[in-house]
Structures are given as C-alpha cells and as structure tokens.
Image (spheres, rainbow, N blue to C red):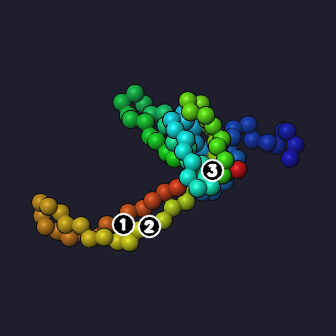
Amino acid sequence: MSEAMKPANPAAAVKPMQVLVQGRVEAVRRYESSSYTLVKIPAPDEYSNPSTVEIRSKQRFAEIGESIKVICVLSGYAKRPRQITDKKTGEVRSFVEVNHYLALVE
C-alpha cells in the first residue's frame, strides 16, 4: 500500500471486533504465560469517572505510568442464566452476566 493510500487516523485501521484503547498504564501483572496490563481511560468529561480496562498480551508492552494507544481484539462470553428476586415486588427475573476481554493485537 502506498503512503498516499494509508489512513492518517489509526482508528480508521481498526477492523470489526477490534478496539482502539488509549489511556495510562496503572499496573502490570504476570500470570502463567500472559501479561495483564491495567489501563485507566480518560473520563469523557469533567463530571464523569474514568473507566479502567485490562489488556491481556503475550509480552509486557508498556511501563507503569506510560500513556499508550493500542489496538485490541474484543471477546467475551455469557454465563449461565441466574434467577434473581426483586426485594420490593418479589418478582423473579432471569439475569445473564456477560464477561468481556481485551487481547492486544501483537
């Protein structure tokens, strides 16, 4: 691809199910053969709390306190449905918890 055809914005290169993560590294831990990097995302405005995500990677890719901009693949799964009871009305409803994961595109 020639230089003229490459997108100037890195977000334009993101494919389906990929996420551009930009933030500051808060912590890094190692478990078995993977590295897990905790990233604090800037708040959208002055009245909101910042979000925090964890990125799994094969190798450590950033130091604590470093600002990063990386592309990750989003994945996840739904747990088994559980029954919950509303304390006020006694109504029984089904609840499905969903876990999301981010893996660094390496």
**Residue farthest to the top?**
46
Left or right of residue 62, residue 47 in this image: left
Instruction: Specify which label sits upstream in the sequence, 2 or 1.
Output: 2
Q: For the residue carrying disc 1, how many other residues have a C-alpha within 10 Å: few (<14), some (14-19), or many (20+)?
A: few
Secondary structure under the numbered disc 1 in the rendered image: loop
Seen at 36% across and 30% down, the residue is: 47
Instruction: Specify which label sits upstream in the sequence, 3 or 1.
Output: 3
Q: For the residue carrying disc 3, how many other residues have a C-alpha within 10 Å: few (<14), some (14-19), or many (20+)?
A: some
Q: CA distance from mark 3 to mark 1?
A: 27 Å
Kindly tell me whether residue 32 is visible in this rendering. yes
Residue type, label 1:
Val
Proximity of marks 2 and 1: CB atoms separated by less than 8 Å: yes
Q: Which residue is denoted by mark 2 in the rendering?
A: 78
Q: CA distance from mark 2 to mark 3?
A: 22 Å
Q: Quadrant of residue 7?
A: top right
Seen at 51% across and 42% down, the residue is: 38
Residue type, label 2:
Ala
Q: Position of residue 13 (x, y in %)?
A: 70, 47
Seen at 17% across and 68% down, the residue is: 91
